Image (tube, rainbow, N blue to C red):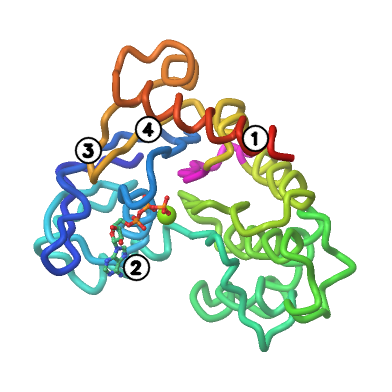
Amino acid sequence: MLNIQNLKLSFGEKEVLKGVDLNVNKGDVVTFIGPSGTGKTTILKCINYLVEPHEGQMQIGDINIDFKNINKKETLKLRRNTAMVFQQFNLFKNKTVLENVMDAQIAVQKKSKKEAYDKSIDLLGKVGLLDKEKDYPSKLSGGQQQRVSIARALAVEPDIILFDEPTSSLDPELVDEVLKVIERVAKTGVTILLVTHEMDFARKISNKVVFMEKGKVVEEGPPQQIFENSQNERTKKFLRKFYAKTNEMVEAK
Ligand SMILES: Nc1ncnc2c1ncn2[C@@H]1O[C@H](COP(=O)(O)OP(=O)(O)OP(=O)(O)O)[C@@H](O)[C@H]1O
Ligand SMILES: [Mg+2]
């Protein structure tokens, strides 16, 4: 359902994506791991067209895009077929929880208010926030805000949901409530691309893990292959370092 070939992007002189290929099937949960500054967020942003790749092809459902010649109509289609959940939630601060979830349904999907309302209430129930519909985001905890932004992403029924480190800015005790919601979303069969440092979670929910380094995919495969059986020196080195750091943090506590 998603096929990316030779995706390239530079910021000024800096080449950030150096020809990324990716193949995702409907219902896949794909997790991206890799060192900081490697281009993981940038890939998600390319798929949502928040940044503009200067080369590469992408096929998503029945849309075929050549980034060298992308037109306005294709851009809109891309945006409509994908929804992104950010590390910093990015909710509209001057809108209530309910309005945040209803908004794009009315503005973009042209649904009636009643339809958008019903859908939003249903989704807020699913993320466990029915009692918060009239609140403004500033009154909510980080975990609650993130659950609102997941409901908002689901509201437009995207083919793909892109999660960029959805739990990194949360206090540790709030991480689980958000991971549980993501797990439930994954079980509905929607296609998910996820960037995370929650390795245990990645191992549990993904059927594919992509290890990236310096703007390239180094290795990809089922979680078991990447986490337990990788034959790739760079993947092994990254994971060794990652777990050493995690252990240090645990011991320091
Ligand atoms: N808007 C921008 N303008 C200039 N450079 C950028 C921009 N966005 C990202 N970069 C650079 O592109 C590179 C890749 O960034 P990206 O955010 O995709 O990395 P990442 O793998 O998500 O890292 P992290 O794990 O720290 O989130 C980095 O070197 C970053 O500094
Ligand atoms: Mg990032």
Does residue 220 appear left or right of residue 214 in this picture? Answer: right
Which of the two labelled residues, at mark 4 and mark 3, occupies the earlier sequence position?
3
Asked if the residue at tag 3 contacts the one at tag 4, i.e. Cβ–Cβ closer than 8 Å, the answer is no
Which of the two labelled residues, at mark 3 and mark 1, occupies the earlier sequence position?
3
Say the numbered circle drawn on residue 187: 1
Quadrant, the C terminus? top right
Nearest the eye: 127 or 218: 218
Which of the two labelled residues, at mark 1 and mark 4, occupies the earlier sequence position?
1
Nearest the eye: 58 or 94: 94
Amino acid type of disc 1?
Lys
Say the numbered circle drawn on residue 50: 2
| Mark nearer the viewer, 2 or 4 | 4
Looking at this view, name the residue that lies furthest to the bottom. Answer: 94
Which of the two labelled residues, at mark 2 and mark 4, occupies the earlier sequence position?
2
Amino acid type of disc 3?
Asp
Which of the two labelled residues, at mark 1 and mark 2, occupies the earlier sequence position?
2
Q: Secondary structure at mark 3?
A: strand
Asked if the residue at tag 1 contacts the one at tag 3, i.e. Cβ–Cβ closer than 8 Å, the answer is no
Does residue 125 appear left or right of residue 48 in this picture? Answer: right
Quadrant, the N terminus? top left
- The residue located at (74%, 73%) in the rendering is 117
Say the numbered circle drawn on residue 21: 3
Nearest the eye: 74 or 231: 231
> Which residue position holds label 4?
210
Amino acid type of disc 2?
Leu
- The residue located at (29%, 49%) in the rendering is 62
Work out whether 113 lies above or below 224: below
Q: Secondary structure at mark 2?
A: loop
- The residue located at (37%, 15%) in the rendering is 230
